[in-house]
Amino acid sequence: MKLCKYLSADGLFGLIRKGFEEINDFCSSRRGIVLTDALMSAFAMFSLKDPSLLAFDQLRQTDENLKSIYHINHVPSDTHMRTILM
């Protein structure tokens, strides 16, 4: 393993995503949002320090960085995120 490859935000996010991909998704009620995307969305919300799910939802609708930086294909809405987290 080459260490320098992982000493960047992109490398770190890639390692986190890879770890999330190894978790089995037993819940099929996410309506097209895979568990990895839901977990990466929660990680993005935490790392961006959004004050609320609604603030994150507003960012989700206007910012393509969530998809390009965090490699999230489908970002859940605030309501959907609440459902997943419960």
Image (tube, grey):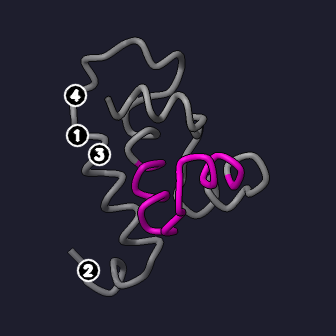
Instruction: Kindly indicate whether the residue at mark 1 contacts the one at mark 3 (C-beta within 8 angstroms).
Output: yes
Q: Is residue 26 above or below residue 47?
A: above
Name the quarter where the C terminus is drawn: top left
Label 3 sits on a secondary structure element that is: helix
Earlier sequence position, callout 4 versus callout 2: 2
- The residue singled out by tag 1 in the image is 22
Q: Which mark is residue 70?
A: none
Percent coordinates x, y for residue 55 in the rendering: 63, 54
**Residue at x 33%, y 77% (from the top left corner):** 6
The residue where tag 3 is placed is 20
- Pinpoint residue 66: horizontal percent, then vertical percent: 61, 56
Quarter of the rendering occupied by the N terminus: bottom left
x and y percent of residue 27 in the render?
31, 16
Q: Are marks 2 and 3 in contact (CB under 8 Å)?
A: no
Label 4 element class:
loop
Mark 2 and mark 1 lie on one chain; the one further toward the N terminus is: 2
| Camera-nearest residue between 67 and 6 | 67
Instruction: Name the residue at 52% across, 28% down.
Output: 80
User: Residue 28: x and y, percent?
Assistant: 37, 12
Label 3: few (<14), some or many (≥20) within 10 Å? some
19 relative to 67 in the view: left or right: left
Q: Are marks 4 and 2 in contact (CB under 8 Å)?
A: no
Q: Quadrant of residue 13?
A: bottom left
- Look at discs 4 and 2 and give the one toward the viewer: 4
Mark 3: which amino acid? Phe
Q: Quadrant of residue 46?
A: bottom left
Label 4 to label 2: alpha-carbon separation: 28 Å
Task: Count neighbours of disc 2 (C-alpha within 10 A) and say few if under 14, some if 14 to 19, many if 20 or more.
Answer: few
Numbered mark located on residue 24 in the image: 4
Disc 2: which residue: 2
